Image (cartoon, coloured by chain):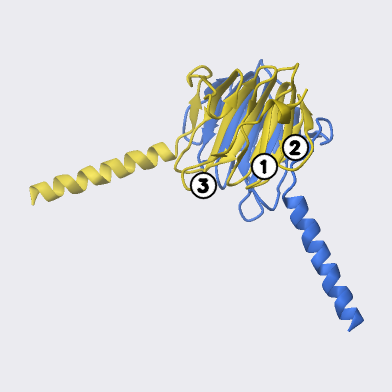
Chain colours: A blue, B yellow
Amino acid sequence: MAKALTAFLLVAALSLMSQAQAQSIEIMPGGSRPTSKGAAQTFIGPVSIAPLFGTKDQTRITVGRVTFEPGARAAWHTHPAGQILIVTDGTGWVQQWGGKKGEMKAGDVVWIPPGVKHWHGATRTDAMTHIAIQETVDGRNVDWMEAVSDEQFGG
Amino acid sequence: MAKALTAFLLVAALSLMSQAQAQSIEIMPGGSRPTSKGAAQTFIGPVSIAPLFGTKDQTRITVGRVTFEPGARAAWHTHPAGQILIVTDGTGWVQQWGGKKGEMKAGDVVWIPPGVKHWHGATRTDAMTHIAIQETVDGRNVDWMEAVSDEQFGG
C-alpha cells in the first residue's frame, strides 16, 4: 500500500514537473549550442552549422544557421515538409533538379516545397549564410542524395 | 459535349499549373515584402514588422522580422502552436504571465510554448530586433490580449 502510494505520488510529481516545463518560456543564450562542421557525406567544402532550435515535443520545427564558404554546397536532398531559407549574409546559389540555378542574396527568402530535390550553397566566389527552417516528419527533416558535382555546381 | 470537354480540359490544365507551382522553388527578393508599422491595438511604441514568409498551402509556418524601438513592446498574447524568436540585434525583454521578466540579446533563441500568455519587446533603453517563427492554426497564429502597462514593463 505504501509502495503504491509512493509510486502514485512520484508519477503525479513528475507529471506536474513536465507540465510546468512545457509551460515555461525558455531563453537559450547564444553560444550555448555548439556549431558543427558539415559532414563530408552531405556537404562539399567548408560548411558550418549552428543548431539554433532543436526538436521539441510541442513543435515539429527545427532551425539552424548554415554558413557555406565560397565553392561549398550541400548534396542533392529533399525535405519532407519543405524548407524556408532566410539569407542573412553573402550570395549563394539554389537549384532544383531539372531547373536552372538561381541566385540568392542577403535579405532574400527562399521556399523549397516538400519533396523537391534540390541543393543550395555558396557561389564559386562568395560565401553565403542562411537561417534554415524545416519540420521533422517521422524523425527526419531531410533526405540526402548524391553529391553536387563540380560540373553541376558550375562557375 | 464540347462544353463538358472544355470544362474538363480547363480543370486539368489549372490543376497541372497549380501542381507545377507547388513543385517550384521560389526566391523572394529582399525588399519585395513591404514592412508595416505595428498596430496601436497590439503594440505600444514604435514597432516595424517585415513579413518574411506568409501562409502557404504546403506549410503552416509564417516568419516575420520585428524591430522594437526602446520602450516599445507587444501587448500580452498567446500563440496557438508556440513561437520561436531568434534575436538578431540589440537587447529585449520577454515575460510570461505570473513570471519574471527575462533579458534576451542578439544571438539568443527563445521558445514560447503554445498557449502561454506573454509579451516581448525592447528594453527601456535599447532597441531589439528578432525573427519570429510561428504556425497558423485555424487561420490564426496569435491571440491578442490586454496592453502591457508601464508598470508591468518597468525600467
Q: Which residue is mark 1?
A: A62
Q: Please tell me the numbered disc located at residue B47.
A: none
**SS assignment at label 2:** strand
Badge nearest the viewer, 1 or 3: 3
Q: Residues within 10 Å of mark 3 (few under 14, many from 20)?
A: few
Q: Which quarter of the image is occupied by the C terminus of chain A? A: top right
Figure quadrant of residue B102: top right
Disc 2 with disc 1 on a shared chain: yes
Could you tell me residue A80's position as x and y percent? 56, 48
Could you tell me residue A62's position as x and y percent? 67, 42
Q: Please tell me the numbered disc located at residue B137.
A: 3
In the image, what residue type sits under mark 1?
A: Thr
- Between the residue at mark 1 and the residue at mark 3, the CA separation in whole angstroms equals 18 Å
User: Would residue A67 be seen by someone viewing this image from the given angle?
Assistant: no
Q: Which quarter of the image is occupied by the N terminus of chain A? A: bottom right
In the image, what residue type sits under mark 3?
A: Val
Disc 1 with disc 3 on a shared chain: no
- Between the residue at mark 2 and the residue at mark 1, the CA separation in whole angstroms equals 8 Å
**SS assignment at label 1:** strand
Proximity of marks 2 and 1: CB atoms separated by less than 8 Å: yes
- Between the residue at mark 3 and the residue at mark 2, the CA separation in whole angstroms equals 26 Å
Outermost residue toward the right in this view: A2
Q: Please tell me the numbered disc located at residue A51.
A: 2
Residue under mark 3: which chain is it in? B
**SS assignment at label 3:** loop
Could you tell me residue B144's position as x and y percent? 56, 38
Q: Residues within 10 Å of mark 2 (few under 14, many from 20)?
A: some
Earlier residue among tags 2 and 1: 2
